[in-house]
């Protein structure tokens, strides 16, 4: 089993959730066709492909923020600057999103492990708000769980078996 020890103990529980959600993301997408992944079922809801891509983008942003590096997912332009779902746009395959997820996850995980108190307490300024990096990580971990739950619901609405946790 991989370590859950972090430089700052505040992040240890988040690392456990990060690891669970790493696997849950892949399991939630398992078997969904690319056609179904872009089906909004005549609603205004975000479809599976957008949810998946936005989650990948968020992991890249977390890794980039914590490392100071500049990693990019293959279709980042569709999601940069918190861009919402776009009508009439064909989103990439779920396989592409899974590949990008697997690429950035070890980088983000290592950055989360190595974030010390000074890093976690430093501020991030965004349009209209300011928060600490610890608060940013808290939001990211919460949002991952939320979006994976939405994908799990879409599985059922689209006629797929429920997401398997094991």
Image (tube, grey):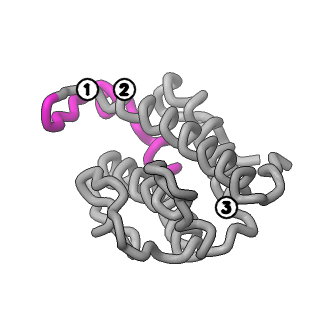
SS class of the residue under badge 2? helix
The magenta region covers 109-128
Q: Is residue 18 left or right of residue 164?
A: left
- Mark 3 and mark 2 residues within 8 Å of each other at the beta carbon: no
| Residue visible at 50% across and 69% down in the picture | 100
User: Which mark is first along the chain, 2 or 3?
Assistant: 3
Residue 86 position by quadrant? bottom left
Q: Is residue 62 left or right of residue 46?
A: left
SS class of the residue under badge 1? strand
Q: Residues within 10 Å of mark 3 (few under 14, many from 20)?
A: many
Compared with 22, 89 (above or below) is: below
| Residue visible at 60% across and 28% down in the picture | 13
| Residue visible at 28% across and 69% down in the picture | 77
Q: Is residue 106 visible?
A: no
Residue identifier under label 2:
135
Q: Position of residue 130 (x, y in %)?
A: 19, 27
SS class of the residue under badge 3? helix
Query: Mark 3 to mark 2: distance in Å?
Result: 28 Å
Q: Is residue 155 left or right of residue 72?
A: right
| Residue visible at 52% across and 24% down in the picture | 9
Q: Residues within 10 Å of mark 2 (few under 14, many from 20)?
A: some
Residue identifier under label 3:
29
Q: Position of residue 102 (x, y in %)?
A: 57, 66
- Mark 1 and mark 2 residues within 8 Å of each other at the beta carbon: yes
Residue identifier under label 1:
131
Q: Position of residue 80 (x, y in %)?
A: 27, 59
């Amino acid at each position: 089993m991989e370590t859950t020890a972090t430089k700052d103990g505040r992040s240890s529980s988040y690392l456990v959730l990060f690891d669970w959600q790493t696997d849950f993301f892949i399991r939630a997408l398992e078997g969904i066709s690319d056609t179904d992944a872009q089906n909004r079922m005549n609603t205004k809801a975000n479809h599976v492909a957008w949810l998946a891509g936005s989650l990948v983008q968020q992991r890249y942003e977390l890794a980039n923020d914590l490392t100071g590096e500049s990693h990019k997912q293959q279709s980042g332009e569709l999601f940069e600057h918190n861009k919402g779902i776009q009508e009439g746009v064909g989103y990439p395959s779920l396989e592409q999103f899974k590949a990008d997820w697997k690429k950035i996850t070890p980088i983000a995980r290592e950055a989360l492990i190595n974030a010390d108190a000074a890093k976690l307490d430093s501020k991030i300024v965004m349009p209209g708000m300011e928060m600490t990096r610890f608060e940013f990580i808290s939001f990211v971990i919460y949002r991952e769980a939320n979006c994976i739950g939405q994908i799990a619901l879409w599985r059922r609405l689209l006629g797929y078996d429920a997401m398997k946790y094991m």
